[in-house]
Amino acid sequence: MRRTLFAIVLLLGVLWPGAAQATVPAPAVTRAPAAEGGRVVLIGVPGLQWSDLSPEGTPNLWQLAGQSAVGSLSVRTVGRVTCPYDAWLTVSAGVRSAVGYGCGLPPVPEPDDGGAFIPAYDYLLQTAGQRNAGALGEAVHAAGGCTLAIGPGAALALADRGGKVDHYAPSPAQIRAEALTRCGVIAVDVDDLIRPYLTGDRLPQVEEALTAQERATALRRADVKAGAVLSVLPEDATVLLAGLSDHGSQPHLRVAMMRPAGQAAQAQERFLGAASTHREDVTILPDITATILSLAALPAPQGLVGSPWQVSESRTGGTEQARAELNSADVAGRTIREIGGAFFTTVAVLQVLFYLGAFLLLRRGRGLGLVRAAAVFLASLPVSTYLVNLTDWRHAGTPLLSLAAGIVGIALLLAVVALAVPALWARLRRDGSAPSSERPAPRGGSPLGPLAIVTGVTAAVLAGDLLAGTPLQLDSVMGYTAVVGARYYGLGNIPFALFATSVLLLASVIAHRLSRRGGRKAVAVAVVAVLGCSAMILGGWPGVGSDFGGVIAFVPGIAVTAMLLAGSRVSIVKLGALVAAGGVTVMVIAYLDYLRPPASQTHLGRFVGQVFSGEAMDVIGRKFGAMVGTLLNPNLMPIVIVAIAFLVYALLRPGAASAGVLPAAFEYSPALRAGLIGTLVSGVVGMLVNDSGAAVLSMALALAVPLTLSAGVGVLRGRRTGPYASAGQQPASSDLVSRNS
């Protein structure tokens, strides 16, 4: 459905940015009745994933799945994997949290007059810096309610800021059914699945520490305990079940279920999502806190980042089909995670080999066609990583191989089209089948033709993807995955780099065409401003692109391109002012988001709230640390270094480095030079203000520089085979190029 929707949006081409919210049917929020006696029960089964469930192996959980709305739970907190301690602590705090040392099970509570308290709870608040710990329990107590916890993790989740839970039992076997009617908020820790994995109270450093038989045995124990709880719950209880944590060294998507109160016998057959992810079938750990508070009709404390779970309008087609689809989402995310390192290493190697090969061939004036074809193919790779999601690679027998083959195949197809269409158009013009121009077209077509096609496709795909709710960026090699959990919707950092680059270069080509036809500079500048600002708003608007750093970087890129086209001088002072303008622009957007209700805010609006609460510096510090960490990335920095080195050397020594390819390109199209400089400005600023750091600049260069070289090669080939070649003439401006060719 989403792929079809994306194709429709892409064909329509122009839609109001707010339509992104309307592309996915608005999910209906299921709420527990607010009447007295209604209650919510959270059953946490750390380590549980959808591939575990079956009618034979887990009959109680399977039956619950048939009665519930179901979805995937992204359990990422702070580190790469999430242990039970961090997961239960996140439920307690309502924000992603971590204990700060070795990760295992939560501490065992100490009994206290029918309830219990968490030992050394002050450590979390004062030493570990978990200032939000206890937010859920505190909210329940502030409203005059009580909490019932069964098991250590449940006690940690429901403890107030003093570490106290009102009623406690170590296991379901030690609590009577009537005790479950005492409180409106109940949590149960079913840790039978995760316990066999722990070594010295820590998660193992391997992906799967148990054999299939050992895991099946642990699953049966967990299923029996969960079934015992479900069998004695009051009828007015809304049940939430969550596979709260990872079980090894590799992250997975986990199980999320919600069975409405009073409907235990009815099949739901709906997906479960949340506004926090903008996905109809994916939720995050902090959403559990927001859901409990919403179902219990309790006010949410300030600082929570989650949103209540929402039941979508999309039907699952039954428990078996839902399990298959949700499990395939986990497979897709893990496949992307596995191929990511190898893919970016391959891209880095290809980029380095391309520049070395281009240097050797161009300085000898040979292999111009080969250099141009390789450049266009490399530039076609990024957008192919998104277009491949229009195929069904994730359901193939070997998803990894199908994904790689799909990316390469689509890139080759796009490169062939980008090279063939301008040549075909030029032939039609020469034969008089198309309108003639002032100068006959060269045999290879317009030098800017391949650049225009590749950037046009890249910009259109990413814009259409944003309007359709980003089905293509999710689970893509140059996008993001819910398994990793860094982003779930909107414009990612690498897609931003590609989007900004493609828009600026495409706008430059349009400006070039206008100037060739006698258009005024003002018109060309207006084209860059309109296209650039439209793309910037699309990428930064809350709920659509929701990209914070991208807006800061896009504004100076657009302005520099426009200023160079207008013939204005760009100084360091002006550049600094433009970066500041980008910061002001994104803060205005973020403040508008902040004015919306908390449940509707994105991370842009929440950042404004963190500025007011004094937490913003912690966020900025984490982002800055992540950015610095990318500067030594072996997959990213080689692209930056070799591309910058080639550009600088080619411009300083055009004859020795590239047979004058870059000067030829810029001489043919001064607008292209303006677009490339604007792209570099945007890439450098984007590197400094985004946590992806070097990834932003490296991907901008990986797209822009090969395409610029392809344009220069097209100019050289046109001078050899164009209308001047047959008369034995060269344009006066090509003396330098002809001597080096």
Image (spheres, helix red, strand yellow):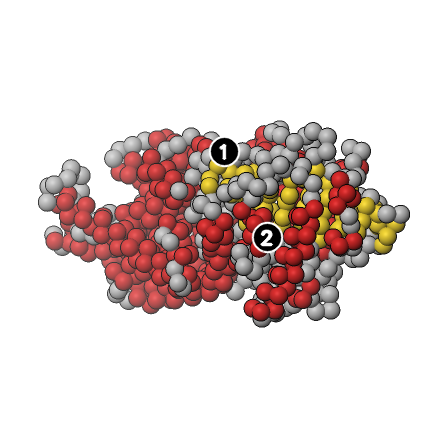
The spot of residue 113 in percent (x, y) is 89, 47
* Tag of residue 26: 1
Q: Quadrant of residue 425?
A: top left
Q: Which one is in front in this view, the residue at disc 2 or the one at disc 1?
A: 2
- Quadrant where the C terminus sits is bottom left
Instruction: Please state which of residues 260 and 449 is positioned toward the viewer in this rendering.
Output: 260
Q: Is residue 517 left or right of residue 654?
A: left
Q: Amino acid at mark 2?
A: Leu
Q: Can residue 200 be spotted in the picture?
A: yes
Q: Residue at x 22, y 52 (%)?
A: 420
* Tag of residue 691: none
The spot of residue 108 in percent (x, y) is 80, 57
Q: Secondary structure at mark 2?
A: helix
Q: Residue at x 47, y 52 (%)?
A: 320
Q: Quadrant of residue 12?
A: top left
Of pointers 2 and 1, the one earlier in the residue sequence: 1
Q: Is residue 666 left or right of residue 430?
A: right
Q: Amino acid at mark 1?
A: Ala
Q: Residue furthest right?
A: 113
- Quadrant where the N terminus sits is top left
Q: Is residue 75 left or right of residue 467?
A: right
Instruction: Please state which of residues 583 and 635 is positioned toward the viewer in this rendering.
Output: 635
Instruction: Please state which of residues 420 and 105 is positioned toward the viewer in this rendering.
Output: 105
Q: Secondary structure at mark 1?
A: loop
Residue under label 2, please give it: 61
Instruction: Please state which of residues 483 and 14 is positioned toward the viewer in this rendering.
Output: 483
Local crowd at mark 1 within 10 Å, few (<14), some, or many (≥20)? Answer: some
